[in-house]
Amino acid sequence: MDTAIINLPAVIDRPHLPSTLRAALETAADLASNSRAASTRAAYASDWRIFARWCETHCLCPMPASPATVAGFLVLWCAND
């Protein structure tokens, strides 16, 4: 599977996609990856690591996170500031 397709928000696991659809998905992945500045993507990645670690510490699944998980993270995270 192409790296560009793996980096889409949803993983597309269809190895027999028509070439026209594969090209469209690669273009979509390029557009998505270039829609934010490198510093913004780095900040998002850092925030994700913090959230994922917090979930692991509390035996919660980060993806997909339930609304209660996100709310708990935000309340406890803000209380630490």
Image (tube, grey):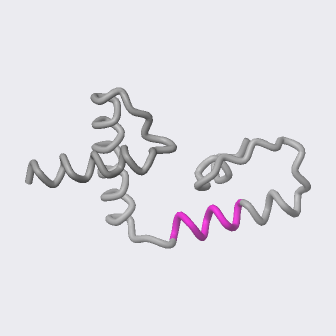
Eyeballing the image, is 59 above or below 50? above
Q: Is residue 30 magenta?
A: yes
Q: Residue at x 88, y 63 (%)?
A: 20
Q: How many marks?
A: 0
Eyeballing the image, is 78 above or below 24? above
Q: Residue at x 70, y 46 (%)?
A: 2
Question: As drawn, is 39 to the left or to the right of 33?
Answer: left
Residue 38 falls in image quadrant: bottom left
Return the residue nearer the eye: 12 or 30.
Answer: 12
- In percent of width and height, residue 48 lies at 36, 48
What kind of secondary structure does the magenta stretch mostly adopt?
helix
- In percent of width and height, residue 32 lies at 56, 67
Magenta-drawn segment: 26-34
Eyeballing the image, is 8 above or below 68? below
Quarter holding the N terminus is: top right
- In percent of width and height, residue 9 lies at 58, 55
Outermost residue toward the left in this view: 81
Question: As drawn, is 74 to the left or to the right of 52?
Answer: left
- In percent of width and height, residue 61 lies at 44, 34
Return the residue nearer the eye: 53 or 40.
Answer: 53
Q: Is residue 13 magenta?
A: no
Quarter holding the C terminus is: bottom left
Q: Residue at x 61, y 55 (%)?
A: 8
Q: Residue at x 70, y 67 (%)?
A: 27
